[in-house]
Image (cartoon, helix red, strand yellow):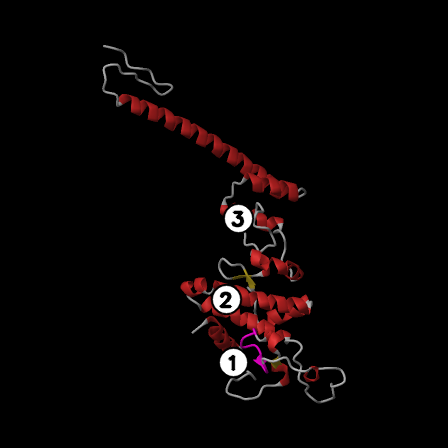
Amino acid sequence: MNFYEKISIVFFLFVCLGSIDTRRSFVTPREVCDKIHGFLVGGTALVSSLDLPESFYLSSRLLLSNRLVIDMREIKLDLLIKQLKSLVLCYQKSSLIEQKNETFDYLNLSKRLYETLSHLNNPNDILKEMRICDLNEWIWNSINGYSSINHIYLLDKNHPLSSYVQILPYELYNYRNFFESMGVKYQPESSKLEDLLRSQQILDENLFKWIKETYTTDRRLLQLINDLELKLISKGNNNKTKNLNDEQTRITFSSTLDLSDDKVYLYLPGKNPPKDN
């Protein structure tokens, strides 16, 4: 079973077959689309692979009271969100090997969904439909599937913080404005940054420098950075002392291996050399 077949099955299970049933020859007007939206597997019914005439589309002149008119110019928002939900469910139900082998497929379909949603330009309605579908993790992160709005950031991969948080993949950079409109932030709040520093025990000079330049008024966070910098300095000094002692021990040990008559003994500091007999 290929990727798109699995997506279709998961979608139909998610909507409990609803009004879309492959056993029927007909669908309702709101369930059809033209070929430009044919990539939305399971979410719509493709009427034709040909370009349909303009008369097939909805217009104000055709809208009559109590009459359904075929609207193939746009995809309905609730179907888009259900399709996105089915994509996330399919990924979660797949094995690690399947997830790895089908990474490109998930990325490709996710991009198409984001592109379609971005054209709607109505974040409040999108978020409302997501709440109805209980869809929280929907942003592809390329590492472990999908992330929520509060757990991914619009940072470049070279940013000092990018090694410690989930960032938007490079392949989705074209949709940064869309994700920003949906509530994705460029950097975490100071409280979240504190939790991150404590939980991961981060000692990174470049990151500390960026934090001090960015969160200039947060005294609590700056105090934490000061404490961590002192810890980093102490750790560096301990490493220097340890390396010096190791080097001295190595010299002493290697010298005592010389079995020649002209022996040269080196002793660690603080040790008195033995008296000659």
Separation of disc 2 and disc 1 at Cα?
24 Å
Residue 44 is covered by the magenta coloring: yes
On the question of residue 87 being in view, the answer is: yes
Image quadrant for the C terminus? top left
Q: For the residue carrying disc 2, how many other residues have a C-alpha within 10 Å: few (<14), some (14-19), or many (20+)? A: few
Mark 1 or mark 3, earlier in chain: 1
Please report the residue visible at 63 percent of the width from the left and 68 percent of the height from the top: 117
Which residue is at the front of the view, 120 or 125? 120
Amino acid residing under circle 2: Asp
Quadrant of the snapshot with the N terminus? bottom left
Marker disc for residue 227: none
From this view, report whether residue 157 is shown above or below residue 23: above
Question: Which residues make up the magenta segment?
Answer: 39-48
| Quarter where residue 260 is shown | top left
On the image, which quarter does residue 262 sit in?
Answer: top left
Relative depth, front residue between 269 and 246:
246
- Looking at the picture, which amino acid does disc 1 mark? Cys
- How many numbered callouts? 3
What residue is rendered at 52% in x and 72% in y? 86
Secondary structure of the residue carrying tag 2 is helix
What residue is pinned by disc 2?
105
Question: Which class describes the residues within 10 Å of circle 3: few (<14), some (14-19), or many (20+)?
Answer: few
> Given this view, does label 2 or label 1 mark the residue nearer the observer?
2
From the image, tell me which residue sits under label 3. Answer: 163
